[in-house]
Image: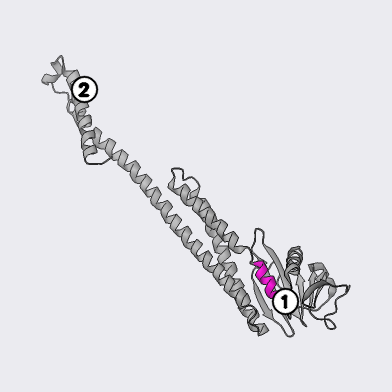
Amino acid sequence: MIYEIKDNKILLSKLKQLNLEKYSNQLIILTNNEFQNAHLNLEQPINNFKYIKIDDYMNYLLGTLIINKQKDVSLYFYIINNNIIFVDDSTFTKDLIDEIIEKCQKQGYDIYKFLKDFLEKIIDKDLENLEKISSSLALLEETILKSNKDGINHRLMIKRKEIIKFYHYYSQLIDFGLTLQEKTNSTLYSVFIKRVERLQSETMLLREYTHQLQELYNSELNNRQNDIMKVLTIVTTIFLPLTLLTSWYGMNFKYMPEISWILGYPLFIILFAITFILCLIIFKIKKFW
């Protein structure tokens, strides 16, 4: 598919074949198979590339992009003789160009201004995605403060990995924009770079937020364990004097006057009850529970 930039507009071209030497200001979208069959003698990035970067060759620039959306989209492009060739097996590039066509009305529009619009369109809704992550972290915080904490650690780990992925993504985009600005000797991409830097700052804040949630989660776990230990300590302390009494009267001495008392057993139960109640009153006064 070939588009051409003409009269400050992006138009679908009637050309059937590529001619990079004769025509300029073209936007060309090819699949990998179409690119191979075109025999353009251009270097290709390594298969399954994982980095966003731009390389400078003798008479053209080669850029690779990984779009970090719900599903990662990988594509690469060439800037050659004032033309851009996109190699993309998905419909991502075409969809973005169609969106740009609707709003394209700028004086002196060319492939470099189009590329600026294209890059800005890529990150257009990223702030909304980061806000969704922030909202999900806020829900996690509420869950941590409630009694049910099952699976919180796993969910925090997933969010942390997602945020780190975004952080590296924006780091590469910043380097990409700076390199593109340097290679094209243009300040067109400064706004794009600043926008990406702000998005990266947002990911840093989210990253700090996850660390705070992890600390809150650990603190809540410690509080829960402290409450359990507190209950166990109170129970142990209450039954300690009772255990002493049972041990005392469990001795097998022949002459123990209490053994022959008719009221010995009831008095022993009353002594147990008084001891138990006294312990509870002391704990309440001391605010142990």
Main SS of the magenta part reads: helix
| In-image side of 14 versus 227 (left or right) | right
- Residue drawn at 58 percent across, 64 percent down: 166
Whether 21 is among the magenta residues is: no
Residue assigned mark 2? 269
Q: Is residue 159 visible?
A: yes
- Residue drawn at 32 percent across, 42 percent down: 229
- Residue drawn at 63 percent across, 63 percent down: 125
The answer to whether residue 56 is above or below residue 256 is below
Going from N to C along the chain, the mark reached first, 2 or 1, is 1
Kindly identify the amino acid type of the residue bearing the numbered disc 1: Lys
| In-image side of 130 versus 245 (left or right) | right
Circle 1 packing at 10 Å, graded few (<14), some (14-19), many (20+), is few
Q: Quadrant of residue 283?
A: top left
Q: Is residue 240 visible?
A: no
The image's mark for residue 273 is none
> Tag 2, which secondary structure?
helix
Provide residue 42's location: percent of width, then percent of height. 77, 78
Viewer-closest of 215 and 49: 215
Viewer-closest of 95 and 220: 95
Provide residue 9's location: percent of width, then percent of height. 78, 74
> Tag 1, which secondary structure?
loop
Residue lying furthest top: 262
Kindly identify the amino acid type of the residue bearing the numbered disc 2: Ile
Quadrant occupied by the C terminus: top left
The answer to whether residue 242 is above or below residue 176 is above
Viewer-closest of 257 and 230: 230
The answer to whether residue 134 is above or below residue 87 is above
Q: CA distance from mark 2 to mark 1?
A: 96 Å
Residue assigned mark 1? 106
Instruction: Read off the magenta span.
Output: 111-122
